[in-house]
Amino acid sequence: MKALQFLLFSMMFALILLSCAVQKTEEQIKMEALADEILYSGKQVYLAHNLWYENPDKIEAINFKTLPFKIEAGTPVKNVIITYYNNDPRIRFKVMGEVASYYILINLRYQKNDIKKLTYKELVARTFTTIPFDEFTSGLKQEEIDNIKHGTIQRGMSKKAVLMSWGYPPLHFTRKLDDSRWTYWKMRVQKEYVDFDKDDRVLNSSWYGNNGNANDIIK
């Protein structure tokens, strides 16, 4: 009898796992494959977007924009792994040529909403890439690349350029990247909004001040 109960339990458990696997979207499968390449392939890895921090041991994945230090998009890095401290997951990496390690606090409570919950591997795939900066920015205008290097946003920038400059907007306020407004954080108590037009170009941003109006527009 116990053997039969164990068999039934095992079958139910297997069905649950199979169901979870089937529910993965094409985007999730793609992102997890990219993460595996970053984590395990041995290829050179680069930072996919600018990353702001104050303490290299406690870099917030939410990416507050007023922190004093910035690692630029395209910076070569190595030894990217998912590690744990007091049962809290973190992403550890080193910048090429430096000895010290950096630790990104994953904070998945900010990376979920009613339609999606980010996984550790998806966050790795969003934060790092195996594509060099010059190739990663292929197709972008020079003004967009200049803004990425400075960590700024300008009217007329594409969504791809915004992602490289500011990183991905946290999921708990931006449900999906198709949204016409992305919400970021300048600091813990101050949100920053980026609005896009019908062509997915930056229409305005509260970062500019003066109701989000910029004097220069990328055309």
Image (cartoon, rainbow, N blue to C red):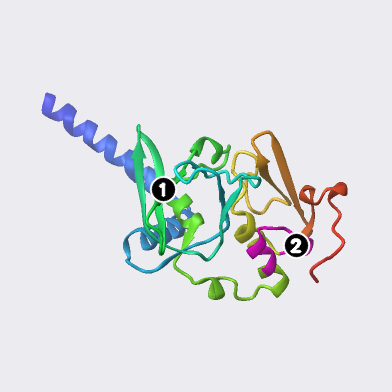
Residue, x 39% and y 49% (percent of image)? 92
Residue, x 73% and y 71% (percent of image)? 143
Q: Is mark 1 on a helix, strand or loop?
A: strand
- Most distant residue in the top direction: 1
> What range of the chain is rendered magenta?
146-157
Characterize the local packing of mark 2: few (<14), some (14-19) or many (20 or more) Cα atoms within 10 angstroms: many
Amino acid type indicated by mark 1? Ile
Question: Residue 137 lies in what quarter of the image?
Answer: bottom right
Is the residue 64 above or below the residue 159 in the image?
A: above
Image coordinates for residue 115, horizontal then vertical, percent: 57, 41
Image coordinates for residue 216, horizontal then vertical, percent: 84, 65
Residue, x 33% and y 42% (percent of image)? 17
Q: In this view, does 186 lie to the left or right of 42?
A: right
Residue, x 66% and y 72% (percent of image)? 140
Q: Name the residue under label 1.
A: 91
Image coordinates for residue 1, horizontal then vertical, percent: 12, 24
Q: Which of marks 2 and 1 is nearer the N terminus?
A: 1
Circles 2 and 1: CB distance less than 8 Å?
A: no
Residue 152 is one of the magenta-drawn residues: yes
User: Closer to the observer: label 2 or label 1?
Assistant: 1
Q: Is mark 2 on a helix, strand or loop?
A: loop
Residue 109 is one of the magenta-drawn residues: no
Question: Residue 49 lies in what quarter of the image?
Answer: bottom right
Amino acid type indicated by mark 2? Arg
Characterize the local packing of mark 1: few (<14), some (14-19) or many (20 or more) Cα atoms within 10 angstroms: many
Q: Distance between the residues labelled 2 and 1?
A: 31 Å
Q: Mark 2 points at which residue?
A: 201
Q: Is residue 177 left or right of residue 39?
A: right
Image coordinates for residue 168, horizontal then vertical, percent: 59, 52
Is the residue 197 above or below the residue 173 in the image?
A: below
Q: Is residue 99 left or right of residue 7?
A: right
